[in-house]
Image: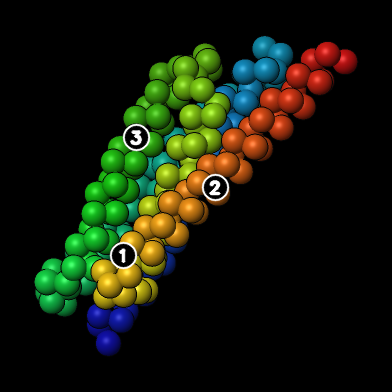
Amino acid sequence: MLYSIIKAIHIIFMVSYFAGIFYLVRLFVYYKDTDEFDEVKQQILRNQYIFMAVRLWNIITVPAGILMLLSGITMIFLNSGLMKTPWFHLKLTFLVGLGIYHFWCWKKVKELKKLNGDILPTTNIKLRQFNEIATFILFGVVFTVILKYSVIEYWWQLILGFFGIIILISSIVKMVNRNKTKDSRQKNQE
């Protein structure tokens, strides 16, 4: 019973953490989108996005990440057999990737604060692509946890499907950004 309660807590904080990460990088994109606005509107929105990103990071994302991590470690202690399973090692590999992504987000939040309303040097398309990394990690973790040993048995089919999803999502991001750029050019010509 205790294990199931800890697992439920882990899932709840995983959802909260990913919600924070998803929205945080979206705020970076919105901040970058202000490059085209007049100076007054730009400063108002940039200050608001910085405020929102810092609050989201400090109040939701980091605390949820810590509680997700602590509940995950507790589950490992309660079920040490997890460390002997290949699928769990794959999950841990995805979590290392999530840790690297988390570090990148933290650096971006710090960078936004230091910019003090200046232009974010990262390109819009890069931010939109980075916005999808958490999605790919989430796909990998969820499929690994749900399918467990089947992930190992059917690894090559899953990798093909995973890359298919990555290509599909990346193509959609590029298409949306291309349409956004096209619309922006048309507005500037009018």
Q: Are marks 3 and 1 in contact (CB under 8 Å)?
A: no
Mark 3 crowdedness (10 Å alpha carbons): few <14, some 14-19, many ≥20: few
Q: Can residue 92 be seen in this view?
A: yes
Depth check: give the residue in front, 156 or 69: 156
| Cα gap from disc 3 to disc 2, whole angstroms | 21 Å
> Which element is circle 3 on?
helix
**12 or 152, which is in the foreground?**
152
Q: Which mark is residue 169?
A: 2
Q: Is disc 1 in contact with disc 2, using a CB cutoff of under 8 Å?
A: no
Left or right, 22 with respect to 10, comes to right
Between marks 3 and 1, how big is the CA–CA gap? 28 Å
Nearer to us: label 1 or label 2 = 1
Amino acid residing under circle 1: Trp
Upstream in sequence: badge 1 or badge 2: 1
Picture coordinates of residue 92, whole percent (x, y): 23, 58
Q: Which residue is drawn at 28% across and 53% down?
A: 95
State how far apart marks 1 and 2 are (Cα).
21 Å
First in residue order: circle 3 vs circle 2: 3
Q: Is residue 90 left or right of residue 10?
A: left
Is disc 1 surrounded by few (<14), some (14 to 19) or many (20+) residues within 10 Å? few
- Coordinates of residue 71 in the picture (x, y in percent): 26, 66
- Residue depicted at 37% across the width and 27% down the height: 110
Where does label 3 land, which residue? Answer: 104
**Location of mark 1 (residue):** 155
